Image (spheres, rainbow, N blue to C red):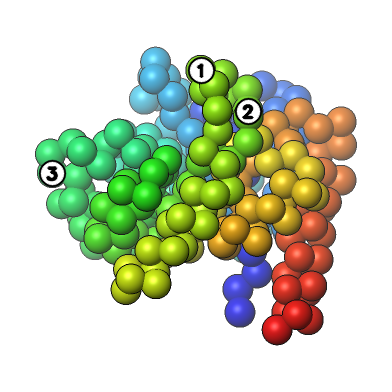
């Protein structure tokens, strides 16, 4: 059985900041991070994303267990930086031709993930046979200050409940404001196969300790769950 995923989300424009890069490096060398997701935001220039992707690729050359995925509108950009996968934003699910682009990405041997914030989006993305769904927002977070209320772990449970009607879901990665062991327990209990974090690691006073704590919390939850079976 695969261990729960730990995904570290990295804003592309921050990779070049020394303190951020050192935090990323500290997290990766623990061996606890399964995926680095490079996140391009609106306004980021393509050359900046490529530069950030190249930096992270060099870092991961000595850490074979960690994969690089790029969250950006262009599948070609993700492939161009040598990433293992391409992450699609929820709003891009409605863009004409997205199914073909996802199919093309998989033909290039890129894994594909999709962000979702509703059951409807999860069902649509699952039809495209993607590798995982990143489900948010779990808890209030500075990454989405515009949200008055987070969707919460209940969204994970609602997506899992669709499987009772025959829907097939890829792994679900919980994202958004996951800061404590209680948060980790809540999302894993609700049906998450892993978690994605940004500030919980990148702005921690000790990124190494924070990374290992997240891994320990997930492993502990798994052991307790297995003992209850």
Alpha carbon distance from label 2 to label 1: 10 Å
- Residue ID for mark 2: 141
Q: Nearer the viewer, mark 2 or mark 3?
A: 2
- Which of disc 3 and disc 2 is earlier in sequence? 3
Q: Is residue 64 above or below residue 21?
A: below
What secondary structure is found at the residue carrying circle 1?
loop
Q: Within 10 Å of the Cα at label 2, are there few (<14), some (14-19), or many (20+) other Cα atoms?
A: some
| Residue 128 sits in quarter | bottom left
Residue shown at 34%/39% (left/top)? 90
Alpha carbon distance from label 3 to label 1: 29 Å
User: Which quarter of the image is occupied by the C terminus?
Assistant: bottom right
Q: For residue 179, which numbered disc appears in the image?
A: none
- Find residue 60 and report its horizontal and vertical position in percent: 61, 51
- Which of disc 1 and disc 2 is earlier in sequence? 2
- Residue ID for mark 3: 97
Q: Within 10 Å of the Cα at label 1, are there few (<14), some (14-19), or many (20+) other Cα atoms?
A: few
- Find residue 197 and report its horizontal and vertical position in percent: 64, 41
Residue shown at 32%/46% (left/top)? 121
Does residue 149 appear to the left or right of 109 in the view shown? right
- Find residue 87 and report its horizontal and vertical position in percent: 39, 45
User: Which quarter of the image is occupied by the N terminus?
Assistant: bottom right
Q: Is residue 159 above or below residue 75?
A: below
Residue 25: in sight, yes or no?
no
- Residue ID for mark 1: 146
Residue shown at 79%/43% (left/top)? 180
Alpha carbon distance from label 2 to label 3: 32 Å
Does residue 217 appear to the left or right of 89 in the view shown? right
Counting labels gives: 3
Residue shown at 33%/71% (left/top)? 165
Q: Nearer the viewer, mark 3 or mark 1?
A: 1
| Residue 200 sits in quarter | top right
């Amino acid at each position: 059985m695969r261990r729960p995923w730990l995904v570290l989300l990295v804003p592309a424009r921050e990779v070049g900041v020394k303190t951020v890069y050192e935090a990323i490096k500290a997290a990766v060398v623990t061996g606890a991070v399964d995926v680095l997701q490079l996140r391009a935001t609106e306004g980021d220039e393509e050359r900046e994303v490529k530069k950030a992707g190249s930096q992270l690729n060099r870092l991961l050359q000595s850490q074979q267990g960690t994969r690089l995925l790029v969250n950006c509108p262009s599948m070609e950009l993700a492939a161009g930086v040598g990433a293992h996968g391409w992450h699609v934003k929820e709003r891009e699910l409605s863009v004409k031709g997205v199914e073909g682009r996802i199919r093309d990405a998989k033909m290039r041997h890129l894994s594909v993930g999709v962000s979702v914030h509703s059951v409807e989006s999860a069902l649509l993305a699952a039809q495209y046979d993607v590798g995982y769904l990143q489900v948010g927002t779990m808890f209030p977070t500075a990454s989405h200050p515009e949200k008055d209320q987070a969707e919460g772990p209940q969204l994970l449970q609602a997506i899992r409940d669709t499987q009772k009607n025959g829907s097939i879901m890829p792994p679900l990665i919980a994202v958004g404001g996951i800061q404590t062991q209680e948060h980790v327990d809540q999302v894993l209990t609700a049906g998450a196969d892993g978690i994605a974090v940004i500030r919980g690691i990148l702005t921690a006073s000790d990124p190494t300790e924070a990374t290992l704590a997240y891994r320990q919390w997930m492993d502990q939850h798994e052991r307790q769950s297995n003992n209850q079976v």
